[in-house]
Image: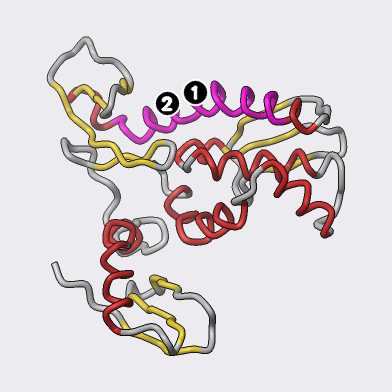
């Protein structure tokens, strides 16, 4: 399928591909980048562009996800196929290189997947927090995984750390960045140069993680 896009030439140093509110694709490219280089960059983003354009929450004219065999479901930065099975013994969501869902549970799929994500987030995020806090030499009070509406995570004045369950859909390096960000607040309250040096010491590629969230964050915010 041909990908239609508009190229905007700028003085910026790097190439940026974005999907606008009307679902049009805009490539903002430095003046020295050739058309062939732009085409290759767009092709590399084909799957991401497909996901962005068909994201129902951001583009409310799009239909919600159909939970049928072959549907792609995200987990830890990867997309895995869903297989709907007739086996009544399959209750809830099961995962082994792909997701399995009983046909009898298709109508409950959004709720089942959210419950599965929350469970996995509660299993994995606190363990990562404990490990990274030990490496940084900081102490916290509690770790909570909840349905944060406006942010990915927060650090309270009582040193409680809150994480959005939707992060479990992101790559591990992104989750590690969010954790390092909140733990760094225990050492430096504000986003000072010192704060970012602390984050970088734990996650050297944190800028890549920030960019990933800008480009893919709305997909994490989808129902599933």
Give above or below for 79 relative to 211: above
Q: In percent of the image, x 29 and y 84: which residue is there?
A: 35
Residue assigned mark 2? 116
Residue 212 pos. (x, y %): 50, 55
Residue 208 pos. (x, y %): 55, 56
Q: Does residue 62 show up?
A: no
10 Å crowding of disc 2: few (<14), some (14-19), many (20+): some
Q: In percent of the image, x 47 and y 42: which residue is there?
A: 171
Residue 184 pos. (x, y %): 78, 43
Q: Does residue 13 show up?
A: yes
Q: In percent of the image, x 62 and y 22: which residue is there?
A: 127
Query: As rendered, which of 118 and 188 lies closer to the eye?
Result: 188
Where residue 52 sits, quadrant-wise, is: bottom left
Q: Is residue 172 magenta?
A: no
Q: CA distance from mark 2 to mark 1?
A: 5 Å
Query: As rendered, which of 210 and 13 lies closer to the eye?
Result: 13
Q: Which residues are magenta?
A: 108-132
Give above or below for 203 relative to 62: above
Where residue 93 sits, quadrant-wise, is: top left
Q: Quadrant of the N terminus?
A: bottom left
Q: Is residue 40 left or right of residue 214?
A: left
Residue 11 pos. (x, y %): 53, 89
Q: Quadrant of the C terminus?
A: top left
Q: In percent of the image, x 45 and y 56: which residue is there?
A: 216
10 Å crowding of disc 1: few (<14), some (14-19), many (20+): some
Could you tell me which secondary element the residue under label 1 belongs to?
helix
Residue assigned mark 1? 119
The colour scheme used to paint the residues is secondary structure
Q: Is residue 123 magenta?
A: yes
Labels 2 & 1 near each other (Cβ < 8 A): yes
What secondary structure is the magenta-colored segment mainly?
A: helix
């Amino acid at each position: 399928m041909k990908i239609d896009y508009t190229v905007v030439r700028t003085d910026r140093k790097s190439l940026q591909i974005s999907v606008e509110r009307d679902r049009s694709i805009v490539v903002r490219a430095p003046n020295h980048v050739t058309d062939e280089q732009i085409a290759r960059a767009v092709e590399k983003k084909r799957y991401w562009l497909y996901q962005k354009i068909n994201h129902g929450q951001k583009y409310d004219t799009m239909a919600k996800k159909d939970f049928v065999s072959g549907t792609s479901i995200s987990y830890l930065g990867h997309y895995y196929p869903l297989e709907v099975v007739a086996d009544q013994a399959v209750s809830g969501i099961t995962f082994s290189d792909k997701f399995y869902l009983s046909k009898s549970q298709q109508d409950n799929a959004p709720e089942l997947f959210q419950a599965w994500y929350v469970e996995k987030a509660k299993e994995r995020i606190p363990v990562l927090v404990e490990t990274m806090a030990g490496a940084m030499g900081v102490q916290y009070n509690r770790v909570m995984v909840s349905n944060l509406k406006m942010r990915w995570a927060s650090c309270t004045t009582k040193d409680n750390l809150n994480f959005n369950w939707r992060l479990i859909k992101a790559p591990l390096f992104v989750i590690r960045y969010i954790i390092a960000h909140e733990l760094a607040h225990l050492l430096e309250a504000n986003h000072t140069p010192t704060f970012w040096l602390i984050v970088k010491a734990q996650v050297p590629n944190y800028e890549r993680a920030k960019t990933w969230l800008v480009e893919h964050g709305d997909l994490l915010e989808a129902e599933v």
